[in-house]
Amino acid sequence: MGAMSLGQRWMSVLWSAFLMAAVLEMVVFALVDPESLRWFGGDALDLTPRAVYTLAFFLFWAVIAVGGALALLLCSSSDDINRDGQANARTR
């Protein structure tokens, strides 16, 4: 993994998170009707089904991307992390 640039690593995390968010969205909304969702107090959501789908997708994408980024960080060697930091410091 050391041969990949920082941008390539980020894109691999974001792209795989995008694909998994799409799968999770299909699974969740195959089981849950967005019009039957309620807030914790019992009030109905004042959102259209399309808005619920959109917000859920971006939430799924963000959570999965954070998990992927943390896994990537934990799998990186200290040399990879320090090299990327030094390269960013030189460009500033």
Image (tube, rainbow, N blue to C red):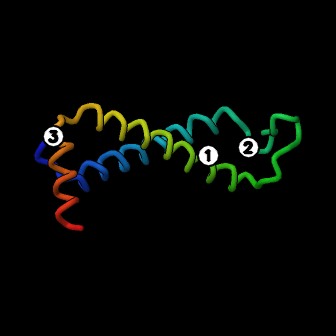
Query: Which structural element holds mark 1?
Result: helix
Q: Mark 2, mark 1: which one is toward the viewer?
A: 1
| Sequence-wise first label, 2 or 3 | 3
Q: CA distance from mark 2 to mark 1?
A: 10 Å
At 19% from the left and 51% from the top, the residue drawn is 84
Can you tell which mark lies on residue 34? 2
| Sequence-wise first label, 2 or 1 | 2
Can you tell which mark lies on residue 1? 3
In the foreground, 11 or 6: 6
Q: Position of residue 4 (x, y in %)?
A: 16, 49
Q: Is residue 12 left or right of residue 81?
A: right
Quadrant location of the N terminus?
A: top left
At 57% from the left and 45% from the top, the residue drawn is 59
Q: Position of residue 26 (x, y in %)?
A: 56, 40
Q: Mark 1, mark 3: which one is toward the viewer?
A: 3
Q: Given the image, on which type of amino acid does mark 1 rest?
A: Ala
Q: Position of residue 7 (x, y in %)?
A: 25, 56
**Do the residues bearing badges 2 and 3 touch, measured as CB atoms within 8 Å?**
no
| Sequence-wise first label, 1 or 3 | 3
Q: Mark 2, mark 3: which one is toward the viewer?
A: 3
Query: Which structural element holds mark 2?
Result: helix
In the foreground, 30 or 70: 70
At 81% from the left and 38% from the top, the residue drawn is 38
> Splitting the image into 4 quarters, where does residue 44 fall?
top right
Q: Given the image, on which type of amino acid does mark 2 rest?
A: Pro
Identify the residue position indicated by label 1 in the image. Answer: 56
**Do the residues bearing badges 2 and 1 touch, measured as CB atoms within 8 Å?**
yes
Q: Position of residue 16 (x, y in %)?
A: 36, 44
Mark 1 Cα shell of 10 Å, populated few (<14), some (14-19), many (≥20)? some
